[in-house]
Amino acid sequence: DSSRDEFGTLLQDNFNNDIIAMVSRYYELQKRMIREHEFDILGHCDLIKKMNAGNFYFNQQDTWYQRLTDDFLETAARYGTRIEVNTGAIARGVTTEVYPNGQMLRRCGEWGIPLVISADAHKPENLDFYYPEAFAEVQASGCRDLEILLGGRWRKLAD
């Protein structure tokens, strides 16, 4: 979650430029976090794509990537983990799509993984940035498990 240069250095120094190994480790650590810790929301679960604009390092449509994200989401589903639909990187001009991507949103819908829309706002003017579009993406994904925190309790939004 820094710069493309720092990402490249991490890839080179720790994974010998093997992006599949790096991405695999990223999702393995997320699965471990889900299994070992209790938390309300897992934020920007596919942050690994942040420095990947234009498929610079990998293609999210590649079979190996799809397998890793499916395996990760199966773990999230098994543990009842809420996944954040994050619009903050769009507001900051870092990405053009929400976290998680559309394919992952569809899987969340298929597997009943609850979603929470969040701005991850770093500035007050971005508190509700891209919310109507994010809501439309969630609906288009087939997800019917959109939740909000209201009165200290998680509640499903009605269709």
Image: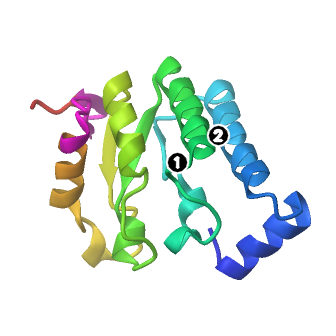
Tell which residue pokes out farthest to the front in this image.
63
Q: Nearer the viewer, residue 89 or 149?
A: 89
Please state if 157 lies on the left or on the right of 13 as rendered.
Answer: left
Quadrant for the C terminus, please. top left
Q: Which class describes the residues within 10 Å of circle 2: few (<14), some (14-19), or many (20+)?
A: some
In whole angstroms, how far apart are the C-alphas of marks 1 and 2?
8 Å
Please state if 158 lies on the left or on the right of 32 as rendered.
Answer: left
Q: Is residue 150 visible?
A: no
> Which label was assigned to residue 30?
2
| Image height of 123 relative to 26, above or below | below
Q: Nearer the viewer, residue 15 or 133?
A: 15
Residue 13 at x, y percent in the picture: 90, 67
Residue 144 at x, y percent in the picture: 21, 29
Residue 111 at x, y percent in the picture: 38, 23
Element type at mark 2: helix
Determine which residue is flagged by label 1: 45
| Residue depicted at x 65% and y 42% | 27
Highlighted magenta segment, given as a residue range: 140-155
Quarter residue 65 falls in = top right
Q: Pointers 1 and 2 in contact (CB under 8 A)? A: yes
Element type at mark 1: loop
- Closer to the chain start, of discs 1 and 2, is 2
Residue 151 inside the magenta-drawn segment: yes
Q: Amino acid at mark 1?
A: Cys
Residue 52 inside the magenta-drawn segment: no
The number of discs equals 2
Residue 7 at x, y percent in the picture: 72, 71
Q: How is the image coloured?
A: rainbow
